[in-house]
Image (tube, coloured by chain):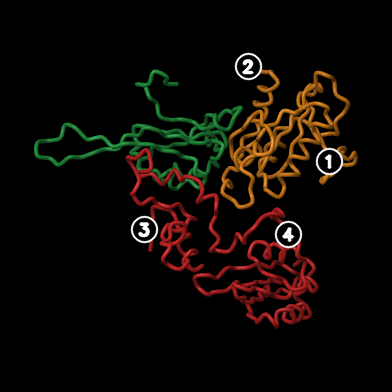
Amino acid sequence: MTEVSPVDWLTAAEALQADGFDYFDWLGCVDEIGRRDCLRIVLVVRNLGEDAEPRMLICSLPRDDPRIDTVSGVFAGAAWHEREVAELFGVVFVGGERRRLLLSPDFEGTPLRKDEVLGARTGMNWPGAKEPGESEASPGRRRMVPPGVPEPEIWGDRDSSQPPADPAEVAESAIGGRVRRTRR
Amino acid sequence: MNSPSQSHRWIRLIEPACTSCMICARECPSWCISIDSHTEPVGGLPPGARDRTRNVLDRFAIDWSLCMYCGICVEECPYDALEWAGDLTQPRSSSELLVEEMVEHTSDATSR
Amino acid sequence: MQRFGFDRQEYRVAMRWVDWYGDASLWVLDVALACCTLEVDAAAPVAAVPLPVLDDRAQVAVVVSGTVTDRLAPAVAAIVDGCEQQAGRRPLLISFGACASSGGPYWDSYAVTKGVDQLLAVDAYVPGCPPPPEALSAVLDQLVGRVPS
Protein backbone atom coordinates (compact mmCIF):
# COMPACT_ATOMS: atom_id res chain seq x y z
CA MET A 1 0.00 0.00 0.00
CA THR A 2 1.52 3.25 -1.16
CA GLU A 3 0.12 6.71 -0.59
CA VAL A 4 0.92 9.38 -3.15
CA SER A 5 -0.07 13.00 -3.62
CA PRO A 6 -2.52 13.95 -6.38
CA VAL A 7 0.27 15.37 -8.59
CA ASP A 8 2.10 12.02 -8.50
CA TRP A 9 -0.99 9.83 -8.98
CA LEU A 10 -0.74 9.30 -12.73
CA THR A 11 3.00 8.70 -12.84
CA ALA A 12 2.70 6.23 -9.94
CA ALA A 13 0.03 4.29 -11.83
CA GLU A 14 2.19 4.27 -14.98
CA ALA A 15 5.18 3.08 -12.97
CA LEU A 16 3.17 0.18 -11.55
CA GLN A 17 2.08 -0.85 -15.01
CA ALA A 18 5.66 -0.68 -16.31
CA ASP A 19 6.69 -2.79 -13.32
CA GLY A 20 4.48 -5.68 -14.44
CA PHE A 21 1.34 -4.73 -12.48
CA ASP A 22 -0.66 -4.24 -15.63
CA TYR A 23 -3.91 -5.93 -14.63
CA PHE A 24 -6.46 -3.42 -13.36
CA ASP A 25 -8.48 -4.85 -10.46
CA TRP A 26 -10.56 -2.00 -9.07
CA LEU A 27 -10.68 1.68 -8.23
CA GLY A 28 -12.78 2.99 -5.38
CA CYS A 29 -13.24 5.75 -2.85
CA VAL A 30 -13.57 5.93 0.92
CA ASP A 31 -15.10 8.89 2.72
CA GLU A 32 -12.85 9.39 5.73
CA ILE A 33 -15.05 12.03 7.37
CA GLY A 34 -14.95 11.60 11.11
CA ARG A 35 -11.35 10.42 11.01
CA ARG A 36 -9.77 12.74 8.46
CA ASP A 37 -11.43 15.39 6.38
CA CYS A 38 -10.72 13.75 3.03
CA LEU A 39 -11.85 11.33 0.36
CA ARG A 40 -9.36 8.53 -0.28
CA ILE A 41 -9.07 7.18 -3.80
CA VAL A 42 -7.87 3.57 -3.88
CA LEU A 43 -6.42 1.82 -6.95
CA VAL A 44 -5.63 -1.91 -6.87
CA VAL A 45 -3.60 -3.55 -9.64
CA ARG A 46 -2.23 -7.06 -10.05
CA ASN A 47 0.67 -8.81 -11.66
CA LEU A 48 -0.91 -11.94 -13.08
CA GLY A 49 2.35 -13.34 -14.40
CA GLU A 50 4.26 -13.57 -11.15
CA ASP A 51 3.08 -14.86 -7.80
CA ALA A 52 2.94 -11.38 -6.31
CA GLU A 53 0.63 -9.59 -3.91
CA PRO A 54 -1.64 -7.00 -5.53
CA ARG A 55 -0.45 -3.43 -5.22
CA MET A 56 -2.64 -0.73 -3.69
CA LEU A 57 -2.19 2.92 -4.53
CA ILE A 58 -3.90 5.54 -2.38
CA CYS A 59 -4.44 9.25 -2.69
CA SER A 60 -6.20 11.57 -0.24
CA LEU A 61 -8.28 14.39 -1.68
CA PRO A 62 -9.91 17.35 0.09
CA ARG A 63 -13.65 16.82 0.47
CA ASP A 64 -14.54 20.30 -0.67
CA ASP A 65 -12.67 20.09 -3.98
CA PRO A 66 -11.68 16.49 -4.82
CA ARG A 67 -9.78 16.46 -8.13
CA ILE A 68 -7.46 13.78 -9.44
CA ASP A 69 -6.10 12.70 -12.81
CA THR A 70 -7.86 9.93 -14.65
CA VAL A 71 -5.92 6.67 -15.02
CA SER A 72 -8.19 5.43 -17.79
CA GLY A 73 -5.41 6.18 -20.28
CA VAL A 74 -3.22 3.69 -18.43
CA PHE A 75 -5.90 1.16 -17.50
CA ALA A 76 -8.92 1.38 -19.80
CA GLY A 77 -11.02 -0.62 -17.36
CA ALA A 78 -10.71 2.14 -14.78
CA ALA A 79 -13.12 4.31 -16.76
CA TRP A 80 -16.30 2.75 -15.38
CA HIS A 81 -14.94 2.70 -11.83
CA GLU A 82 -14.04 6.38 -12.09
CA ARG A 83 -17.50 7.26 -13.43
CA GLU A 84 -19.07 5.46 -10.46
CA VAL A 85 -16.82 7.26 -7.95
CA ALA A 86 -17.48 10.58 -9.69
CA GLU A 87 -21.25 10.32 -9.49
CA LEU A 88 -21.50 8.77 -6.04
CA PHE A 89 -18.80 10.82 -4.24
CA GLY A 90 -18.53 13.95 -6.36
CA VAL A 91 -14.88 13.40 -7.31
CA VAL A 92 -13.65 15.05 -10.53
CA PHE A 93 -11.37 12.87 -12.65
CA VAL A 94 -9.45 15.34 -14.76
CA GLY A 95 -9.36 14.19 -18.37
CA GLY A 96 -11.80 11.41 -17.67
CA GLU A 97 -15.26 10.69 -18.97
CA ARG A 98 -18.03 12.72 -17.35
CA ARG A 99 -21.07 10.60 -18.23
CA ARG A 100 -23.11 9.08 -15.44
CA LEU A 101 -22.92 5.33 -15.06
CA LEU A 102 -25.58 4.17 -12.61
CA LEU A 103 -27.70 7.13 -11.53
CA SER A 104 -30.46 8.69 -13.58
CA PRO A 105 -29.57 11.88 -15.44
CA ASP A 106 -31.68 14.11 -13.19
CA PHE A 107 -30.34 12.74 -9.90
CA GLU A 108 -28.83 15.31 -7.54
CA GLY A 109 -26.45 14.63 -4.70
CA THR A 110 -23.44 12.50 -3.81
CA PRO A 111 -25.13 9.61 -2.01
CA LEU A 112 -22.09 7.64 -0.82
CA ARG A 113 -20.62 10.50 1.16
CA LYS A 114 -21.22 9.75 4.81
CA ASP A 115 -22.80 13.13 5.52
CA GLU A 116 -25.46 12.62 2.88
CA VAL A 117 -28.61 11.60 4.66
CA LEU A 118 -30.83 8.95 3.12
CA GLY A 119 -33.90 11.05 2.39
CA ALA A 120 -36.36 8.17 2.25
CA ARG A 121 -35.64 7.26 5.86
CA THR A 122 -36.21 10.76 7.10
CA GLY A 123 -39.47 11.11 5.19
CA MET A 124 -41.12 7.85 6.20
CA ASN A 125 -42.61 7.19 9.61
CA TRP A 126 -40.40 4.62 11.25
CA PRO A 127 -42.55 1.91 12.81
CA GLY A 128 -39.90 1.57 15.51
CA ALA A 129 -40.33 5.16 16.68
CA LYS A 130 -43.26 4.22 18.88
CA GLU A 131 -42.57 3.21 22.43
CA PRO A 132 -43.95 0.03 24.00
CA GLY A 133 -47.48 0.74 25.13
CA GLU A 134 -48.02 3.45 22.54
CA SER A 135 -50.25 3.66 19.47
CA GLU A 136 -49.57 7.14 18.24
CA ALA A 137 -46.66 9.52 18.47
CA SER A 138 -47.20 11.42 21.67
CA PRO A 139 -46.24 15.06 21.15
CA GLY A 140 -43.44 16.41 23.26
CA ARG A 141 -41.85 13.03 23.85
CA ARG A 142 -38.43 12.60 22.26
CA ARG A 143 -38.75 10.31 19.30
CA MET A 144 -36.19 7.60 18.67
CA VAL A 145 -34.59 7.97 15.23
CA PRO A 146 -33.86 5.01 12.99
CA PRO A 147 -30.34 4.04 11.90
CA GLY A 148 -29.30 6.26 9.01
CA VAL A 149 -31.05 9.37 10.29
CA PRO A 150 -29.07 11.84 12.39
CA GLU A 151 -30.36 13.01 15.77
CA PRO A 152 -32.87 15.85 15.40
CA GLU A 153 -30.73 18.44 17.16
CA ILE A 154 -27.93 17.83 14.66
CA TRP A 155 -29.96 17.63 11.47
CA GLY A 156 -33.57 18.36 10.75
CA ASP A 157 -34.58 19.98 13.98
CA ARG A 158 -31.41 21.88 14.72
CA ASP A 159 -31.51 25.01 16.81
CA SER A 160 -31.51 27.82 14.25
CA SER A 161 -29.28 30.00 16.41
CA GLN A 162 -26.49 27.43 16.03
CA PRO A 163 -24.32 27.20 12.92
CA PRO A 164 -25.15 24.33 10.54
CA ALA A 165 -23.80 20.95 11.63
CA ASP A 166 -20.44 20.08 10.16
CA PRO A 167 -20.21 16.97 7.97
CA ALA A 168 -18.42 14.97 10.65
CA GLU A 169 -21.23 15.55 13.13
CA VAL A 170 -23.86 14.50 10.61
CA ALA A 171 -21.93 11.40 9.55
CA GLU A 172 -21.32 10.29 13.12
CA SER A 173 -24.89 10.83 14.20
CA ALA A 174 -26.36 8.99 11.24
CA ILE A 175 -24.47 5.79 11.97
CA GLY A 176 -27.05 4.57 14.41
CA GLY A 177 -26.63 0.90 14.84
CA ARG A 178 -28.52 -2.10 16.03
CA VAL A 179 -30.88 -0.67 18.49
CA ARG A 180 -30.25 -3.19 21.23
CA ARG A 181 -26.65 -2.20 21.71
CA THR A 182 -25.90 0.74 23.99
CA ARG A 183 -24.68 3.81 22.16
CA ARG A 184 -21.26 5.22 22.83
CA MET B 1 -39.79 -33.38 5.54
CA ASN B 2 -39.42 -29.73 6.35
CA SER B 3 -36.49 -28.56 4.24
CA PRO B 4 -35.43 -24.93 4.69
CA SER B 5 -36.99 -23.92 1.39
CA GLN B 6 -40.29 -25.40 2.54
CA SER B 7 -40.31 -23.84 6.00
CA HIS B 8 -39.04 -20.26 5.63
CA ARG B 9 -42.08 -19.00 3.76
CA TRP B 10 -44.04 -17.14 6.38
CA ILE B 11 -43.54 -15.60 9.81
CA ARG B 12 -46.13 -16.33 12.44
CA LEU B 13 -46.89 -14.28 15.55
CA ILE B 14 -47.43 -16.16 18.80
CA GLU B 15 -49.62 -13.49 20.31
CA PRO B 16 -49.62 -14.55 23.98
CA ALA B 17 -45.83 -14.29 24.08
CA CYS B 18 -45.63 -10.75 22.64
CA THR B 19 -45.00 -7.95 25.13
CA SER B 20 -45.07 -5.09 22.57
CA CYS B 21 -41.41 -4.40 23.33
CA MET B 22 -40.93 -3.00 19.76
CA ILE B 23 -37.59 -4.73 19.24
CA CYS B 24 -38.66 -6.59 16.07
CA ALA B 25 -40.09 -3.39 14.54
CA ARG B 26 -36.90 -1.53 15.33
CA GLU B 27 -34.53 -4.22 14.05
CA CYS B 28 -36.40 -4.94 10.83
CA PRO B 29 -34.22 -3.59 7.98
CA SER B 30 -37.22 -3.17 5.68
CA TRP B 31 -39.42 -1.36 8.24
CA CYS B 32 -42.20 -3.80 7.43
CA ILE B 33 -43.48 -4.51 10.96
CA SER B 34 -46.10 -2.19 12.46
CA ILE B 35 -47.08 -2.43 16.10
CA ASP B 36 -49.68 -0.57 18.14
CA SER B 37 -50.10 -1.17 21.84
CA HIS B 38 -51.43 0.46 24.97
CA THR B 39 -50.87 0.06 28.68
CA GLU B 40 -53.32 -1.33 31.18
CA PRO B 41 -53.06 -1.50 34.93
CA VAL B 42 -52.37 -4.90 36.39
CA GLY B 43 -55.09 -6.04 38.74
CA GLY B 44 -55.13 -8.49 41.61
CA LEU B 45 -52.09 -7.06 43.34
CA PRO B 46 -51.58 -7.62 47.08
CA PRO B 47 -52.60 -4.70 49.31
CA GLY B 48 -49.92 -2.03 49.60
CA ALA B 49 -48.24 -3.03 46.34
CA ARG B 50 -47.32 -0.18 44.02
CA ASP B 51 -49.32 0.24 40.80
CA ARG B 52 -48.07 -1.76 37.85
CA THR B 53 -48.98 -1.69 34.19
CA ARG B 54 -48.60 -4.13 31.36
CA ASN B 55 -48.50 -3.64 27.60
CA VAL B 56 -51.44 -4.87 25.56
CA LEU B 57 -50.86 -5.55 21.89
CA ASP B 58 -53.50 -3.90 19.69
CA ARG B 59 -51.98 -4.33 16.27
CA PHE B 60 -49.20 -6.41 14.79
CA ALA B 61 -48.89 -6.26 11.03
CA ILE B 62 -46.26 -7.33 8.52
CA ASP B 63 -46.20 -5.74 5.08
CA TRP B 64 -45.23 -8.68 2.89
CA SER B 65 -44.51 -6.42 -0.08
CA LEU B 66 -41.48 -5.14 1.83
CA CYS B 67 -40.42 -8.19 3.85
CA MET B 68 -37.19 -9.78 2.67
CA TYR B 69 -37.55 -12.88 4.85
CA CYS B 70 -34.23 -12.24 6.59
CA GLY B 71 -35.54 -13.59 9.90
CA ILE B 72 -33.93 -10.90 12.04
CA CYS B 73 -37.25 -10.33 13.78
CA VAL B 74 -37.53 -14.02 14.64
CA GLU B 75 -34.00 -14.07 16.04
CA GLU B 76 -34.22 -10.80 17.96
CA CYS B 77 -37.50 -11.35 19.75
CA PRO B 78 -36.59 -11.84 23.40
CA TYR B 79 -39.81 -13.73 24.07
CA ASP B 80 -39.81 -16.08 21.05
CA ALA B 81 -43.09 -14.59 19.92
CA LEU B 82 -42.22 -14.93 16.23
CA GLU B 83 -41.53 -18.17 14.40
CA TRP B 84 -40.96 -19.41 10.86
CA ALA B 85 -43.79 -21.29 9.20
CA GLY B 86 -44.31 -23.10 5.92
CA ASP B 87 -47.50 -21.51 4.64
CA LEU B 88 -46.89 -19.56 1.45
CA THR B 89 -48.04 -15.93 1.54
CA GLN B 90 -50.62 -15.55 -1.21
CA PRO B 91 -50.31 -13.07 -4.08
CA ARG B 92 -52.74 -10.16 -4.07
CA SER B 93 -54.25 -7.78 -6.56
CA SER B 94 -53.01 -4.73 -4.66
CA SER B 95 -49.98 -4.11 -2.49
CA GLU B 96 -52.21 -2.84 0.35
CA LEU B 97 -53.71 -6.31 0.56
CA LEU B 98 -50.21 -7.67 1.24
CA VAL B 99 -50.26 -6.06 4.69
CA GLU B 100 -51.22 -8.91 6.98
CA GLU B 101 -52.88 -8.10 10.30
CA MET B 102 -51.87 -10.75 12.80
CA VAL B 103 -53.75 -9.74 15.93
CA GLU B 104 -57.15 -11.32 16.38
CA HIS B 105 -59.82 -9.01 17.68
CA THR B 106 -62.51 -11.40 18.79
CA SER B 107 -64.45 -8.54 20.37
CA ASP B 108 -64.83 -6.77 16.99
CA ALA B 109 -68.05 -7.34 15.12
CA THR B 110 -66.09 -7.31 11.86
CA SER B 111 -63.25 -9.64 12.87
CA ARG B 112 -61.82 -11.54 9.90
CA MET C 1 -40.59 4.45 -25.87
CA GLN C 2 -38.89 5.76 -29.02
CA ARG C 3 -35.76 6.56 -27.05
CA PHE C 4 -35.13 2.91 -26.28
CA GLY C 5 -36.09 1.68 -29.69
CA PHE C 6 -38.37 -1.07 -28.51
CA ASP C 7 -40.71 -0.22 -31.31
CA ARG C 8 -38.09 -1.35 -33.77
CA GLN C 9 -38.40 -4.79 -35.26
CA GLU C 10 -34.86 -5.88 -34.49
CA TYR C 11 -35.46 -5.31 -30.78
CA ARG C 12 -38.84 -6.98 -30.83
CA VAL C 13 -37.51 -10.25 -32.16
CA ALA C 14 -35.15 -10.33 -29.20
CA MET C 15 -38.13 -10.51 -26.86
CA ARG C 16 -38.70 -14.09 -25.82
CA TRP C 17 -41.94 -15.58 -24.55
CA VAL C 18 -42.76 -18.84 -22.78
CA ASP C 19 -45.69 -20.92 -24.04
CA TRP C 20 -46.70 -21.58 -20.45
CA TYR C 21 -49.26 -24.36 -20.85
CA GLY C 22 -47.84 -25.71 -24.10
CA ASP C 23 -51.07 -24.95 -25.95
CA ALA C 24 -50.43 -21.33 -27.02
CA SER C 25 -53.14 -20.10 -24.63
CA LEU C 26 -50.77 -18.10 -22.40
CA TRP C 27 -47.47 -16.49 -23.34
CA VAL C 28 -45.24 -15.17 -20.58
CA LEU C 29 -42.33 -12.75 -20.88
CA ASP C 30 -39.92 -12.11 -18.03
CA VAL C 31 -38.41 -8.67 -17.55
CA ALA C 32 -35.35 -10.07 -15.79
CA LEU C 33 -33.97 -7.36 -13.54
CA ALA C 34 -32.39 -9.13 -10.55
CA CYS C 35 -32.27 -12.30 -8.47
CA CYS C 36 -36.02 -13.04 -8.63
CA THR C 37 -35.57 -13.90 -12.28
CA LEU C 38 -33.79 -17.10 -11.30
CA GLU C 39 -37.01 -18.30 -9.71
CA VAL C 40 -39.02 -17.31 -12.79
CA ASP C 41 -36.50 -19.26 -14.83
CA ALA C 42 -37.00 -22.28 -12.59
CA ALA C 43 -40.78 -21.98 -12.93
CA ALA C 44 -40.80 -21.76 -16.72
CA PRO C 45 -41.75 -25.16 -18.17
CA VAL C 46 -40.06 -24.60 -21.54
CA ALA C 47 -37.55 -22.24 -23.12
CA ALA C 48 -38.72 -18.83 -24.28
CA VAL C 49 -39.14 -18.18 -28.02
CA PRO C 50 -40.10 -15.26 -30.25
CA LEU C 51 -43.83 -14.57 -30.15
CA PRO C 52 -45.78 -16.26 -32.97
CA VAL C 53 -49.00 -14.93 -34.43
CA LEU C 54 -51.56 -15.18 -31.66
CA ASP C 55 -55.03 -16.67 -31.54
CA ASP C 56 -57.65 -14.07 -30.57
CA ARG C 57 -58.25 -15.84 -27.26
CA ALA C 58 -54.60 -16.13 -26.29
CA GLN C 59 -53.44 -14.21 -23.26
CA VAL C 60 -50.08 -12.66 -22.57
CA ALA C 61 -48.41 -11.87 -19.27
CA VAL C 62 -45.33 -9.88 -18.38
CA VAL C 63 -43.47 -10.70 -15.19
CA VAL C 64 -41.29 -7.99 -13.66
CA SER C 65 -38.77 -9.84 -11.53
CA GLY C 66 -36.25 -7.84 -9.57
CA THR C 67 -35.40 -4.32 -8.47
CA VAL C 68 -36.50 -1.44 -10.69
CA THR C 69 -33.79 1.21 -10.48
CA ASP C 70 -34.66 4.81 -11.29
CA ARG C 71 -32.20 4.66 -14.16
CA LEU C 72 -33.85 1.65 -15.73
CA ALA C 73 -37.45 2.58 -14.96
CA PRO C 74 -38.11 4.21 -18.36
CA ALA C 75 -36.69 1.13 -20.08
CA VAL C 76 -38.95 -1.19 -18.09
CA ALA C 77 -41.98 0.89 -19.04
CA ALA C 78 -40.86 0.89 -22.67
CA ILE C 79 -40.42 -2.90 -22.69
CA VAL C 80 -43.93 -3.49 -21.36
CA ASP C 81 -45.27 -1.06 -23.91
CA GLY C 82 -43.32 -2.91 -26.59
CA CYS C 83 -44.85 -6.17 -25.35
CA GLU C 84 -48.33 -4.74 -25.74
CA GLN C 85 -47.52 -3.54 -29.23
CA GLN C 86 -46.09 -6.89 -30.20
CA ALA C 87 -48.93 -8.96 -28.74
CA GLY C 88 -51.68 -6.68 -29.90
CA ARG C 89 -53.33 -6.85 -26.49
CA ARG C 90 -52.72 -5.56 -23.00
CA PRO C 91 -50.55 -8.00 -21.06
CA LEU C 92 -51.29 -9.08 -17.52
CA LEU C 93 -48.59 -7.50 -15.38
CA ILE C 94 -47.18 -9.49 -12.49
CA SER C 95 -44.98 -7.85 -9.92
CA PHE C 96 -42.81 -10.76 -8.79
CA GLY C 97 -41.05 -10.44 -5.46
CA ALA C 98 -40.60 -7.70 -2.89
CA CYS C 99 -38.44 -5.41 -5.01
CA ALA C 100 -40.87 -5.27 -7.91
CA SER C 101 -43.80 -4.87 -5.51
CA SER C 102 -42.54 -2.02 -3.34
CA GLY C 103 -38.81 -1.64 -3.70
CA GLY C 104 -38.54 -4.38 -1.11
CA PRO C 105 -35.46 -4.17 1.13
CA TYR C 106 -34.15 -1.38 -1.12
CA TRP C 107 -37.21 0.83 -0.68
CA ASP C 108 -35.07 3.48 0.96
CA SER C 109 -32.36 3.58 -1.71
CA TYR C 110 -31.57 6.82 -3.50
CA ALA C 111 -31.67 4.94 -6.78
CA VAL C 112 -34.66 2.57 -6.55
CA THR C 113 -38.21 2.96 -7.80
CA LYS C 114 -40.55 1.85 -5.02
CA GLY C 115 -42.31 -0.83 -6.97
CA VAL C 116 -43.08 -1.24 -10.66
CA ASP C 117 -46.59 0.03 -9.89
CA GLN C 118 -45.07 3.51 -9.78
CA LEU C 119 -44.85 3.14 -13.56
CA LEU C 120 -47.51 0.65 -14.64
CA ALA C 121 -50.77 -0.90 -13.47
CA VAL C 122 -50.09 -4.25 -11.80
CA ASP C 123 -52.52 -7.17 -11.88
CA ALA C 124 -50.90 -9.31 -9.20
CA TYR C 125 -48.30 -8.72 -6.51
CA VAL C 126 -46.34 -11.81 -5.49
CA PRO C 127 -44.60 -11.43 -2.11
CA GLY C 128 -41.28 -13.09 -1.40
CA CYS C 129 -37.59 -12.47 -1.45
CA PRO C 130 -37.55 -14.35 -3.64
CA PRO C 131 -40.90 -16.08 -4.03
CA PRO C 132 -40.53 -19.77 -4.80
CA PRO C 133 -41.08 -20.83 -8.42
CA GLU C 134 -44.43 -22.39 -7.58
CA ALA C 135 -45.72 -18.97 -6.51
CA LEU C 136 -45.47 -17.81 -10.14
CA SER C 137 -47.16 -20.94 -11.47
CA ALA C 138 -49.95 -20.50 -8.93
CA VAL C 139 -50.58 -16.82 -9.68
CA LEU C 140 -50.65 -17.46 -13.44
CA ASP C 141 -53.15 -20.29 -12.90
CA GLN C 142 -55.31 -17.92 -10.87
CA LEU C 143 -55.12 -15.03 -13.34
CA VAL C 144 -56.16 -17.12 -16.36
CA GLY C 145 -58.81 -18.98 -14.44
CA ARG C 146 -57.24 -22.41 -14.42
CA VAL C 147 -57.93 -22.74 -10.68
CA PRO C 148 -60.53 -21.01 -8.57
CA SER C 149 -58.75 -18.07 -6.92
Report which residue position mark 4 lands on.
A100
* Up/down of A60 relative to C96, above or below: below
Q: Mark 3 against mark 4, which lies toward the viewer?
A: 4
Q: Residue A172: image x %, image y %?
A: 47, 64
Judge by depth and name the residue closer to the eye, B6 or A40.
A40
Circle 2 residue: C148
* Chain identity of mark 2: C
Residue A61 image-quadrant placement: bottom right
How far apart in space, not on screen, are marks 3 and 4 (Cα)? Answer: 40 Å
- The amino acid marked with disc number 1 is Phe
Q: Alpha-carbon distance for marks 4 and 2?
A: 49 Å
In the image, residue A14 sits, relative to residue B6, either above or below, namely: below
User: What SS does tag 1 mark?
Assistant: loop
Question: Could you tell me which chain the residue with mark 4 belongs to?
Answer: A
Residue extending farthest top? C148
For the residues labelled 1 and 2, the Cα–Cα distance comes to 36 Å
Q: Position of residue A53 (x, y in %)?
A: 67, 74
Residue B78 rendering spot, x and y as whole percentages: 36, 44
User: Circle 4 — which element?
Assistant: loop
Colour of chain B in the image: green
The residue carrying mark 1 is C6
Name of the residue lying farthest toward the right: C9
Q: Name the side, left or right, on which B24 lies relative to C84.
A: left
Q: Which chain is red?
A: A
Query: Foreground mark, 1 or 2?
Result: 1
Marking on residue A182: 3
Name the residue type under label 4. Answer: Arg
Q: Nearer the viewer, mark 3 or mark 1?
A: 1
Please name the residue shown 90% across and 41% down the image.
Answer: C10
Chain depicted in orange:
C
Which residue sits at x=34%, y=32%? Answer: B16
Q: Quadrant of the C terminus of chain B?
A: top left
